[in-house]
Amino acid sequence: MNYIVFDLEWNQCPQGKSRENPRLPFEIVEIGAIKLNEAKEEIGRFHEMIRPLVYRHLHFRTREVIHITEEELKHARTFSPAAREFLDWCGTDCKFVTWGSLDLTELQRNMDYYRIKNPLPKPLFYYDLQKMFSLLYADGKSRASLEDAVDFLEIPRLWPFHRAIDDTCYTAEIMKRMDLSWVSKYESIDYYRLPENPAEEIYRDFGTYTKYVSRVFADKEQALADKNVAAIRCCRCGLPVWKRIRWFSAGANVYLSLAQCPRHGFIKGKIRLKRTQGDHIFVVKTSKQVDDKTARLIRDKKESVKDRRRERRKKRRSQNS
Ligand SMILES: [Zn+2]
């Protein structure tokens, strides 16, 4: 298996969001990629500028940030031949590595727009090196910029930032210096192509927590009523658990619950509702073993949500009378 470390640069509608094509908000103008073998040694490079066909002029921010000129793109190939060659070059046995979670999604969106057959596996697991960097060197939640990570690891700043091939070089250098042995299991899942039926739904066991990605539902009510979505099992032993607090709304598109395993104690459930391109809903649910203190915090949160709702009802009643 090879690693494909890659980075894309894209352009957006120069006249602003109101004039953009909703099927292609970001049009790729550069692909940069480095192929590493399993020993993380470089065995190939791919670099191509792409002539945009939807937004033929560059958005001022694109020009500013990535320093590409329209002149440079005029003589470049269009996306279809470049992307086909890129996918061939990647080969079938590879693991994609990106800095952040956007590139694979935008690559596939551009492929769909230009009707290129999608040969990538489904579900598509990849290494979000930005997340792994945070797991290794920070709290696992914060996200460092590529430049900060380069400085942190004392990698010489040999190239400018924000060009696809240069950013790819830096990402590859970061990856070479990271010990991936314990973070490699924290692969990310690309959400561009989602499960279409219960059999395709994704379950991942990360040891200390589990993750579930649902199929697509018409709306929020349908998603929350689904038994796979609502189910909670112990993330350590997989056994059914005793529900202590049923799912309750804990903020915009977030639901929490608390359960208890006879052997492993409290299990916190968290549902995040996410919106698809077509305005449908899918669910990412995690369950995690937590200590008594966290369990108490969930209980408090539930109480404060209940109190607030009671207050609102009281206010409404007094306004009506
Ligand atoms: Zn258990």
Image (cartoon, grey):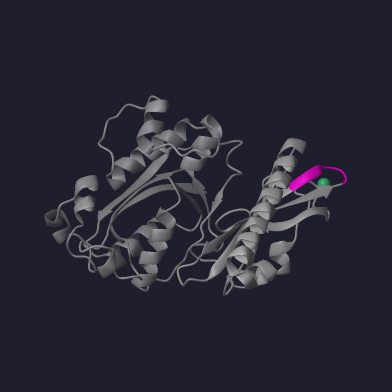
| Rendered location of residue 22, percent (x, y) | 34, 70
Residue 5 shows in this picture: yes
Residue farthest to the front? 321
* Total marks in image: 0
The C terminus lies in quadrant: bottom right
Nearer to us in this view, 77 or 137? 137
- Residue visible at 40% across and 34% down in the picture: 173
- Residue visible at 34% across and 39% down in the picture: 169
- Residue visible at 47% across and 38% down in the picture: 40
Nearer to us in this view, 283 or 310? 310
Residue farthest to the top? 154
| Rendered location of residue 62, percent (x, y) | 23, 52
* For residue 310, side relative to residue 70 (left or right): right
The picture quadrant where one finds residue 266 is top right
Nearer to us in this view, 294 or 126? 294
* For residue 47, side relative to residue 310 (left or right): left
Q: Is residue 100 magenta?
A: no
Residue farthest to the right? 262
| Rendered location of residue 192, percent (x, y) | 48, 63
Residue 211 shows in this picture: no
| Rendered location of residue 46, percent (x, y) | 32, 50
- Residue visible at 88% across and 46% down in the picture: 262
Magenta highlight range = 262-267
The picture quadrant where one finds residue 264 is top right
